[in-house]
Image (tube, rainbow, N blue to C red):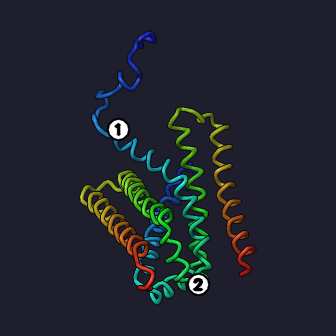
Amino acid sequence: MDSNSYRTPLGRARGLGSAHTGVGRFIGERATSVALVPLSLWAIYAGLKIAPLGYDGAVAFLQSPLNAVLAVLLIAVSVSHMDMGMRVIIEDYIHKPLTKVSLMLLSTGVSWTFGALGIVSVLKVALMSAGTH
Amino acid sequence: MAASIATRASGVALYVGVLIVAGLATALAAGPEAYGVYTGLLGSPLGLIVLFGLTVSIFYHLAAGLRHLVFDSGKGFLPATANATAWAAFAFAVVASLLVWAGYFLLSGH
């Protein structure tokens, strides 16, 4: 390799992989994991915070816009990350095509259905007016 | 090897953990009764064991994830270094989980 080349290693490698795709997935896995460092620490804080409070305290917690936004981001980024992670595990261990594809679709369906349910629920609580609970 | 499989295992545990959190939000949105039933389950002995396991999983997966981000940069592959950081990740997960739970029970007076 010419060490004096002005082309970056990435520039030289781009498009030469056998599959020609996958960079986006690689970056997505890393980007969500970086985002989840603060979000997962916040999740522990939030869990400890609402554990002793009961219903009214948990509602009040989520009615803070910052907490509601962090809860939505936690669920959305987690679902994206766990969908990609479970997919890698299925690809590594399940080799029968029909079983593999079925499990990947099931995992994606379960994670996004629960994620959407969680996000809509957080928003409902966050936007609930004070008199309705 | 063990560190790698533990990263996957904790990831699968956290997959279930996110479903539990989504369920908690759904119960909260459903109202006080549903929230009471759901938090009652989480506060049962089995529920607390699950929650403690999820705490260990979060801290382990966090440390292992940071370790893998360093691997992605091409560093940390010397066997001695990789072994040391693997043990550090296990130790961090156990110590941090015990501290968080002990702190919670001491401060809340339960």
Identified at 24% across, 59% down, the residue is A98
Q: Position of residue A118 (x, y in %)?
A: 39, 70
Question: Mark 1, chain letter?
Answer: A
Residue topped by disc 2: B44
Q: Which mark is residue A23?
A: 1
Q: Tell me: residue B107, above or below residue B99.
A: below
* Amino acid residing under circle 2: Ser
* Closer to the camera in the image, A46 or A40: A46
Q: Position of residue A6 (x, y in %)?
A: 40, 14
Q: Quick one: which residue is furthest to the bottom in this view?
A: B33
Left or right, residue A42 beside residue B32? right
Identified at 56% across, 39% down, the residue is B70
Q: Quadrant of the C terminus of chain B?
A: bottom right
* Amino acid residing under circle 1: Val
Q: Position of residue B27 (x, y in %)?
A: 43, 81
Question: Mark 2, chain letter?
Answer: B
Q: Tell me: residue A116, above or below residue A96.
A: below
